[in-house]
Image: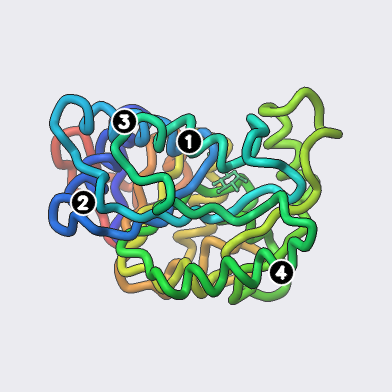
Amino acid sequence: MQVQIYRNYDQMSVAAARLIAAQLRIKPDSVLGLATGSTPEGCYRELIRMHREEGLDFSRVSTKNLDEYVGLDPSNENSYRYFMNDKLFNHVNIRKEATQVPDGASADPEKAAEAYEKLCASMPADLQLLGIGGNGHIGFNEPDTIFHASTFVTALKPGTIEANKRFFHSADEVPRHAITMGMRQILQAKKILILISGPAKAEAAKGLLAGVVDPQVPASILQLHPDVVVMLDEAAARDLPAFQQHESADRFGNCYFFAE
Ligand code: GLP
Protein backbone atom coordinates (compact mmCIF):
# COMPACT_ATOMS: atom_id res chain seq x y z
CA MET A 1 0.00 0.00 0.00
CA GLN A 2 1.20 3.48 -0.67
CA VAL A 3 0.55 5.69 2.34
CA GLN A 4 0.38 9.46 1.94
CA ILE A 5 -0.05 11.71 4.95
CA TYR A 6 -1.22 15.30 4.49
CA ARG A 7 -1.11 18.16 6.95
CA ASN A 8 -4.86 18.57 7.02
CA TYR A 9 -8.20 17.53 5.56
CA ASP A 10 -8.21 20.10 2.77
CA GLN A 11 -4.81 19.09 1.44
CA MET A 12 -5.81 15.43 1.56
CA SER A 13 -9.07 16.20 -0.27
CA VAL A 14 -7.35 18.10 -3.07
CA ALA A 15 -4.81 15.28 -3.50
CA ALA A 16 -7.65 12.74 -3.70
CA ALA A 17 -9.50 14.80 -6.32
CA ARG A 18 -6.31 15.13 -8.37
CA LEU A 19 -5.85 11.38 -8.40
CA ILE A 20 -9.46 10.85 -9.54
CA ALA A 21 -9.10 13.60 -12.17
CA ALA A 22 -5.94 11.93 -13.48
CA GLN A 23 -7.89 8.69 -13.80
CA LEU A 24 -10.63 10.44 -15.80
CA ARG A 25 -8.14 12.17 -18.06
CA ILE A 26 -6.32 8.91 -18.80
CA LYS A 27 -9.58 7.01 -19.31
CA PRO A 28 -12.58 9.32 -19.87
CA ASP A 29 -15.06 6.40 -19.76
CA SER A 30 -13.82 5.20 -16.37
CA VAL A 31 -16.04 3.36 -13.92
CA LEU A 32 -15.68 4.99 -10.51
CA GLY A 33 -16.69 3.26 -7.31
CA LEU A 34 -17.88 6.01 -4.97
CA ALA A 35 -18.42 6.47 -1.25
CA THR A 36 -20.56 8.65 1.00
CA GLY A 37 -19.94 10.12 4.45
CA SER A 38 -18.31 13.40 5.48
CA THR A 39 -14.82 12.31 4.48
CA PRO A 40 -15.16 12.38 0.67
CA GLU A 41 -17.12 15.67 0.65
CA GLY A 42 -13.99 17.83 0.26
CA CYS A 43 -12.80 15.65 -2.60
CA TYR A 44 -16.19 15.97 -4.33
CA ARG A 45 -16.10 19.76 -3.87
CA GLU A 46 -12.69 19.88 -5.54
CA LEU A 47 -13.89 17.66 -8.41
CA ILE A 48 -16.80 20.08 -8.97
CA ARG A 49 -14.37 22.98 -9.02
CA MET A 50 -12.17 21.15 -11.53
CA HIS A 51 -15.21 20.48 -13.68
CA ARG A 52 -16.25 24.16 -13.64
CA GLU A 53 -12.86 25.78 -13.91
CA GLU A 54 -10.69 23.21 -15.66
CA GLY A 55 -13.21 21.38 -17.83
CA LEU A 56 -12.92 18.04 -16.06
CA ASP A 57 -15.32 15.92 -18.08
CA PHE A 58 -17.73 13.39 -16.58
CA SER A 59 -19.85 12.84 -19.69
CA ARG A 60 -18.56 9.30 -20.30
CA VAL A 61 -18.04 8.31 -16.66
CA SER A 62 -20.11 5.61 -14.92
CA THR A 63 -20.31 5.23 -11.17
CA LYS A 64 -21.41 2.67 -8.64
CA ASN A 65 -21.82 3.48 -4.98
CA LEU A 66 -20.87 1.23 -2.14
CA ASP A 67 -24.06 1.19 -0.12
CA GLU A 68 -27.49 2.51 0.75
CA TYR A 69 -29.70 2.54 3.84
CA VAL A 70 -32.63 0.12 3.77
CA GLY A 71 -35.97 1.89 3.91
CA LEU A 72 -34.87 5.31 2.67
CA ASP A 73 -36.33 6.58 -0.57
CA PRO A 74 -33.98 8.48 -2.93
CA SER A 75 -35.92 11.67 -2.12
CA ASN A 76 -34.99 11.31 1.58
CA GLU A 77 -32.17 13.74 2.40
CA ASN A 78 -30.37 11.04 4.36
CA SER A 79 -30.37 8.50 1.58
CA TYR A 80 -27.03 7.97 -0.08
CA ARG A 81 -28.64 8.50 -3.48
CA TYR A 82 -29.70 11.98 -2.34
CA PHE A 83 -26.21 12.62 -0.93
CA MET A 84 -24.51 11.70 -4.20
CA ASN A 85 -26.84 13.85 -6.29
CA ASP A 86 -26.46 16.74 -3.91
CA LYS A 87 -22.70 16.55 -3.30
CA LEU A 88 -21.51 15.62 -6.79
CA PHE A 89 -23.79 14.44 -9.58
CA ASN A 90 -26.01 17.55 -9.77
CA HIS A 91 -22.93 19.75 -10.24
CA VAL A 92 -21.00 17.94 -12.99
CA ASN A 93 -21.88 16.77 -16.48
CA ILE A 94 -22.43 13.13 -15.55
CA ARG A 95 -25.34 11.19 -17.06
CA LYS A 96 -27.56 10.32 -14.07
CA GLU A 97 -28.53 7.03 -15.71
CA ALA A 98 -24.85 6.04 -15.55
CA THR A 99 -24.81 6.42 -11.75
CA GLN A 100 -25.73 3.41 -9.65
CA VAL A 101 -26.71 3.20 -5.98
CA PRO A 102 -28.32 0.11 -4.37
CA ASP A 103 -32.12 0.28 -4.19
CA GLY A 104 -32.67 0.83 -0.47
CA ALA A 105 -36.37 1.53 -0.98
CA SER A 106 -37.06 -1.92 -2.44
CA ALA A 107 -39.77 -3.96 -0.73
CA ASP A 108 -37.35 -6.89 -0.98
CA PRO A 109 -33.88 -5.68 0.07
CA GLU A 110 -32.33 -9.16 -0.33
CA LYS A 111 -33.42 -9.22 -3.93
CA ALA A 112 -32.18 -5.66 -4.42
CA ALA A 113 -28.79 -6.73 -3.05
CA GLU A 114 -28.65 -9.64 -5.50
CA ALA A 115 -29.58 -7.38 -8.39
CA TYR A 116 -26.89 -4.87 -7.36
CA GLU A 117 -24.25 -7.60 -7.21
CA LYS A 118 -25.10 -8.60 -10.80
CA LEU A 119 -25.06 -5.01 -11.98
CA CYS A 120 -21.70 -4.29 -10.32
CA ALA A 121 -20.16 -7.46 -11.73
CA SER A 122 -20.91 -6.10 -15.20
CA MET A 123 -19.05 -2.85 -14.48
CA PRO A 124 -15.76 -3.43 -12.63
CA ALA A 125 -14.39 -0.23 -11.15
CA ASP A 126 -11.26 1.37 -12.54
CA LEU A 127 -10.93 3.30 -9.30
CA GLN A 128 -12.75 2.67 -6.03
CA LEU A 129 -12.95 5.52 -3.52
CA LEU A 130 -13.46 4.52 0.12
CA GLY A 131 -13.94 6.16 3.49
CA ILE A 132 -13.65 4.19 6.71
CA GLY A 133 -15.79 3.86 9.83
CA GLY A 134 -14.31 4.35 13.29
CA ASN A 135 -14.57 0.58 13.75
CA GLY A 136 -12.77 -0.12 10.46
CA HIS A 137 -15.86 -0.68 8.32
CA ILE A 138 -15.76 -0.01 4.59
CA GLY A 139 -19.04 0.53 2.79
CA PHE A 140 -21.26 -0.98 5.46
CA ASN A 141 -19.10 -4.09 5.90
CA GLU A 142 -19.15 -4.08 9.68
CA PRO A 143 -16.73 -6.01 11.93
CA ASP A 144 -17.71 -9.67 11.77
CA THR A 145 -16.33 -13.20 12.08
CA ILE A 146 -16.13 -13.49 8.28
CA PHE A 147 -15.63 -11.24 5.26
CA HIS A 148 -18.74 -11.12 3.07
CA ALA A 149 -18.02 -11.59 -0.62
CA SER A 150 -21.27 -10.52 -2.33
CA THR A 151 -23.50 -7.49 -1.94
CA PHE A 152 -25.67 -8.21 1.12
CA VAL A 153 -28.14 -6.77 3.60
CA THR A 154 -26.35 -5.95 6.83
CA ALA A 155 -27.38 -4.89 10.32
CA LEU A 156 -25.59 -1.72 11.45
CA LYS A 157 -23.55 -1.88 14.65
CA PRO A 158 -24.66 0.33 17.56
CA GLY A 159 -21.44 2.37 17.21
CA THR A 160 -22.18 3.03 13.54
CA ILE A 161 -25.73 4.12 14.32
CA GLU A 162 -24.31 6.42 16.99
CA ALA A 163 -21.69 7.86 14.60
CA ASN A 164 -24.20 8.42 11.79
CA LYS A 165 -27.01 9.86 13.91
CA ARG A 166 -25.54 13.34 13.40
CA PHE A 167 -27.20 13.41 9.99
CA PHE A 168 -30.63 12.52 11.44
CA HIS A 169 -32.91 14.17 14.04
CA SER A 170 -32.14 11.35 16.48
CA ALA A 171 -30.49 7.92 16.70
CA ASP A 172 -33.98 6.35 16.48
CA GLU A 173 -34.31 7.62 12.93
CA VAL A 174 -31.11 5.98 11.69
CA PRO A 175 -32.05 2.90 9.64
CA ARG A 176 -30.95 -0.36 11.26
CA HIS A 177 -30.06 -2.06 7.99
CA ALA A 178 -28.23 -1.25 4.80
CA ILE A 179 -27.42 -2.85 1.47
CA THR A 180 -23.67 -2.90 0.97
CA MET A 181 -21.28 -4.08 -1.66
CA GLY A 182 -19.26 -6.98 -0.28
CA MET A 183 -15.52 -7.41 -0.51
CA ARG A 184 -15.49 -9.04 -3.96
CA GLN A 185 -16.61 -5.94 -5.83
CA ILE A 186 -14.39 -3.69 -3.72
CA LEU A 187 -11.30 -5.84 -4.28
CA GLN A 188 -12.02 -6.25 -7.99
CA ALA A 189 -11.42 -2.54 -8.54
CA LYS A 190 -8.19 -1.96 -10.45
CA LYS A 191 -7.13 0.74 -8.03
CA ILE A 192 -8.39 1.68 -4.57
CA LEU A 193 -8.13 5.06 -2.86
CA ILE A 194 -9.06 5.20 0.81
CA LEU A 195 -9.39 8.51 2.68
CA ILE A 196 -8.97 8.70 6.45
CA SER A 197 -9.43 11.92 8.36
CA GLY A 198 -9.55 13.05 11.97
CA PRO A 199 -8.54 11.65 15.36
CA ALA A 200 -11.64 9.45 15.59
CA LYS A 201 -10.21 7.37 12.73
CA ALA A 202 -6.67 6.95 14.15
CA GLU A 203 -7.46 3.52 15.56
CA ALA A 204 -9.06 2.34 12.32
CA ALA A 205 -6.04 3.61 10.35
CA LYS A 206 -3.76 1.55 12.54
CA GLY A 207 -5.97 -1.50 12.07
CA LEU A 208 -5.91 -1.06 8.30
CA LEU A 209 -2.12 -0.89 8.21
CA ALA A 210 -1.36 -3.28 11.06
CA GLY A 211 -0.47 -6.22 8.87
CA VAL A 212 -3.13 -8.61 10.15
CA VAL A 213 -6.06 -9.33 7.84
CA ASP A 214 -8.95 -9.67 10.25
CA PRO A 215 -12.71 -9.47 9.57
CA GLN A 216 -13.02 -7.63 12.88
CA VAL A 217 -11.27 -4.74 11.07
CA PRO A 218 -12.96 -5.04 7.67
CA ALA A 219 -10.67 -2.51 5.95
CA SER A 220 -7.66 -4.72 6.75
CA ILE A 221 -8.61 -6.90 3.76
CA LEU A 222 -7.31 -4.09 1.52
CA GLN A 223 -3.81 -5.35 2.33
CA LEU A 224 -4.51 -8.15 -0.15
CA HIS A 225 -5.05 -5.72 -3.02
CA PRO A 226 -2.06 -4.87 -5.23
CA ASP A 227 -2.82 -1.17 -5.81
CA VAL A 228 -4.10 0.75 -2.79
CA VAL A 229 -3.38 4.40 -2.02
CA VAL A 230 -4.12 5.37 1.58
CA MET A 231 -4.46 9.13 2.10
CA LEU A 232 -4.63 10.39 5.66
CA ASP A 233 -4.48 13.71 7.41
CA GLU A 234 -2.04 14.04 10.30
CA ALA A 235 -4.78 13.69 12.90
CA ALA A 236 -5.73 10.25 11.58
CA ALA A 237 -2.08 9.21 11.16
CA ARG A 238 -0.89 10.10 14.64
CA ASP A 239 -0.77 6.48 15.90
CA LEU A 240 0.99 4.97 12.90
CA PRO A 241 4.46 3.82 13.94
CA ALA A 242 5.97 4.76 10.57
CA PHE A 243 4.64 8.30 10.90
CA GLN A 244 5.89 8.66 14.45
CA GLN A 245 9.37 7.68 13.25
CA HIS A 246 9.66 10.34 10.60
CA GLU A 247 12.91 8.95 9.29
CA SER A 248 10.99 6.10 7.66
CA ALA A 249 8.78 8.53 5.79
CA ASP A 250 9.96 10.60 2.83
CA ARG A 251 8.88 14.20 3.11
CA PHE A 252 7.71 15.55 -0.23
CA GLY A 253 6.27 19.05 -0.17
CA ASN A 254 3.44 19.00 2.33
CA CYS A 255 3.10 15.28 2.31
CA TYR A 256 4.84 12.26 3.84
CA PHE A 257 4.99 9.12 1.70
CA PHE A 258 5.82 5.65 2.79
CA ALA A 259 5.03 2.10 1.73
CA GLU A 260 3.65 -0.49 4.15
C1 GLP B 1 -20.77 5.34 6.62
C2 GLP B 1 -20.54 4.85 5.20
C3 GLP B 1 -19.09 4.57 4.92
C4 GLP B 1 -18.24 5.71 5.41
C5 GLP B 1 -18.40 5.84 6.90
C6 GLP B 1 -17.55 6.93 7.52
O1 GLP B 1 -21.01 4.36 7.53
N1 GLP B 1 -21.32 3.69 4.92
O2 GLP B 1 -18.92 4.36 3.52
O3 GLP B 1 -16.89 5.49 5.08
O4 GLP B 1 -19.76 6.15 7.17
O5 GLP B 1 -18.18 8.16 7.37
P1 GLP B 1 -17.55 9.57 7.68
O6 GLP B 1 -16.66 9.85 6.52
O7 GLP B 1 -18.72 10.49 7.73
O8 GLP B 1 -16.83 9.45 8.95
Q: In which quarter of the image is the N terminus?
A: bottom left
Side of 249 relative to 179 (left or right): left
Residue placed at 18% from the left, 42% from the top?
Answer: 251
Q: Name the residue under label 4.
A: 111
| Residue nearest the observer in this picture, 103 or 225 | 103
User: Tags 3 and 4 in contact by the CB under 8 Å rule?
Assistant: no
How busy is the neighbourhood of tag 1: few (under 14 within 10 Å), some, or many (20 plus)?
some
Spatial distance from mark 1 to mark 3, Cα to Cα? Answer: 29 Å
Q: Residue 155's quadrant in the figure? A: bottom right
Question: Which colour assignment does the render follow?
Answer: rainbow
Q: Mark 2 points at which residue?
A: 24
Mark 2 crowdedness (10 Å alpha carbons): few <14, some 14-19, many ≥20: many
As drawn, 78 above or below 188: above
Q: Is mark 2 on a helix, strand or loop?
A: helix
N-terminal label among 2 and 1: 2
Query: Is any part of residue 253 visible from this angle?
Result: yes
N-term-proximal mark, 2 vs 3: 3
Choose the circle earlier in sequence order: 4 or 1. 1
Could you say where residue 258 lies in the image, as x and y percent from the top left? 26, 55
Between residues 144 and 250, which one lies in front from this camera angle? Answer: 144
Q: Name the residue under label 1.
A: 85
Question: Between marks 3 and 4, how big is the CA–CA gap?
Answer: 44 Å
